[in-house]
Amino acid sequence: MQIDLDRLERILPTVRTPGRYVGGEYNSVVKDWETTPTRVCLAFPDIYDLGMSNLGLMILYEALNELPDVLAERAFLPWVDMIAAMRDAGMPLYSLENKRPLADFDLIGVTLPYEQVYTNLLEMLDLAHIPLRSEDRSVDDPLILAGGHATFNPEPVAAFVDAFVIGDGEEAVVEAVATFQQLREAPRETQLRALADLPGIYVPRFYDVRYTETEPKAEGPGTVDAIEPTLPEARMPVLKRIVSEMPPAPTRLIVPTVDVSHNRAAIEISRGCTRGCRFCHAGMVVRPVRERPVGEVLRATEEILRQTGFEEVGLLSLSPSDYSRIDELVEAIMERYSDEHLSISLPALRADSFSVTLAEAIAEGRYTGFTLAPEAGSDRMRATINKCIPSRQVFDVAREVFERGWQTIKLYFMIGLPGEEMEDVEAIAEMAQTVHIIGRRFHGRQAQVNVSVNTFVPKPHTPFQWAPLASSRSIREKQALLRRELRGRGIKLDYNDPEASLLEAVLARGDRRLSDVVQRAWELGARFDAWDDQRDFGAWMRAFAKTGLDPDFYAFRERSADERLPWEVVSSGVRKAFLWREYERSQQRETLSDCRETCHACGVLASFPGRQTEEWGCPEPERP
């Protein structure tokens, strides 16, 4: 039954940004609820402003709504004022299209893009009147599926999710829906066994995890001893899904009715990366590279602009300037839309694949900030992370950018990287100051350098998955150094709270025992943990104390080469041996070339035999 719309109308004037909660956007799809047999809700566990900028959600929304017997609707976590108002009114969380309670849907597909939304997931389920834990849900409750980058370690939320889609979701989600349709009337256990039999689907309840015993005075609760499937359908490990060729780009993008974080047309021009940055989770788990042909991007751009009216197009990729025909693509877009003042935006660019042609083409649109991501300030640290861009190259790019009209450059860095010394942090300040000096030569006091410095967090399935998180004390000392050095007009410094990094590190590399911590933290009031003004770190520390687990065990402990890691229940296709060798190379500051130049036998080709295409960017078959 539809929610009480009269009651909703009385609530909306009392909350901030009521447009988040009404739906009705241009290009949204509203199918007939009564005549469409299968109903899916795509849920994003953060506010509308962020979720509507998530291209993955839009891809699944279009793919599912193209099926005649399926409807796909959207739900986002309301902001705190709306949550309170809904709870006071007894109103459950509802979908934007048909205003139906989430509990009425057959399946709920949750996007988990980062770890700090785990308590938000519980808030959504509770607000929807759906039991939090998979074991407490019956066949009358919706199936809870989850996907997204954070699910490459699904264990910390294993208790709350019925099934995880690991890797590319376009085909896997459609297959999961079709499997449910065949078994709609079957017991929940039967449904889950069928899902577990699909490639790329991980069903936690069909795996037993054992932990090592520890001595009474030993630190920590014990590492993972074994992960064992309990059914023949349950694979070990669950290999991620990939689409060999990128499917057509969604073109009927929903036009938000309120301002969102990325209010623009978005086209994924490529998927994957060949650079091999050792810190980069996405660069490892999204391998191999697949590129969308230039002609397809141009057709998609024309169709999206015709159907949306956006004035900016974002060309999305992990490394857009590495797209093999990026200059040709950008020039073609600017030539086609030269009279319409269309702006092109690109994520952070690499200095070593930057081109003057690219800068001049982008400059034909509106001058927005230009973003570069050196990641580390010194050549030594960039060798450690395998991002070998000489400092002089960064300065050359900055000069080209300022000369062509940009007044603002944003620089992305990390601190707390393995092997980092204070002089490496000083090099960050020196690089930012030099870029600012270059800018003042062209723009005087109008030149602006925005420096974003995040704390490095070791992530699963990367060469640094064994490394400890840097101590909060050392991070604060490094941040203090940067504050002293980067002061004055024209330089702005931004950095994150070490407590936020600690929480992210714990959840990123945790095991399924952390489900109890996540639930306890939520019960103590934790939610919106990615928001500095909402995060309740004290609630998390009390939750750890209540459950008897030690966050330091998960965050600050260096793992050994032979330790069984909780996330090994799933596989990105990259060999553990390759990652360990890369970890060793990082300590010697030994670098590897781009995968497009030499195959380094990471394991992806061997993991997907017979699936390779010419677009994968691997120059030769892998060596054994």
Image: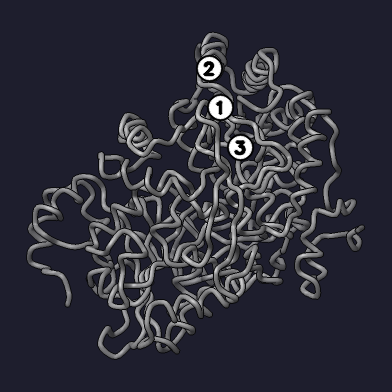
Q: Secondary structure at mark 2?
A: helix
**Extreme-top residue of the structure:** 484
Which residue shows up at 76% across the image and 65% down it?
Answer: 607
Mark 1 surroundings: few (<14), some (14-19) or many (≥20) residues within 10 A? many
> Which amino acid lies under the numbered mark 2 shown in the image of this protein?
Gln
Which residue shows up at 27% across the image and 83% down it?
Answer: 33
> Which amino acid lies under the numbered mark 3 shown in the image of this protein?
Pro
Image position, residue 605 (x, y; %): 80, 64
Numbered circle sitting on residue 458: 3
Q: Which residue is mark 2?
A: 479
Q: Which residue is mark 1?
A: 453
Image position, residue 368 (x, y; %): 53, 40
Q: Nearer the viewer, mark 2 or mark 3?
A: 3
Numbered circle sitting on residue 308: none
Q: Secondary structure at mark 1?
A: strand
Dot placed on the residue nearer the N-terminal end, 2 or 3: 3
Mark 2 surroundings: few (<14), some (14-19) or many (≥20) residues within 10 A? many
Tell me: residue 440, above or below residue 355.
above
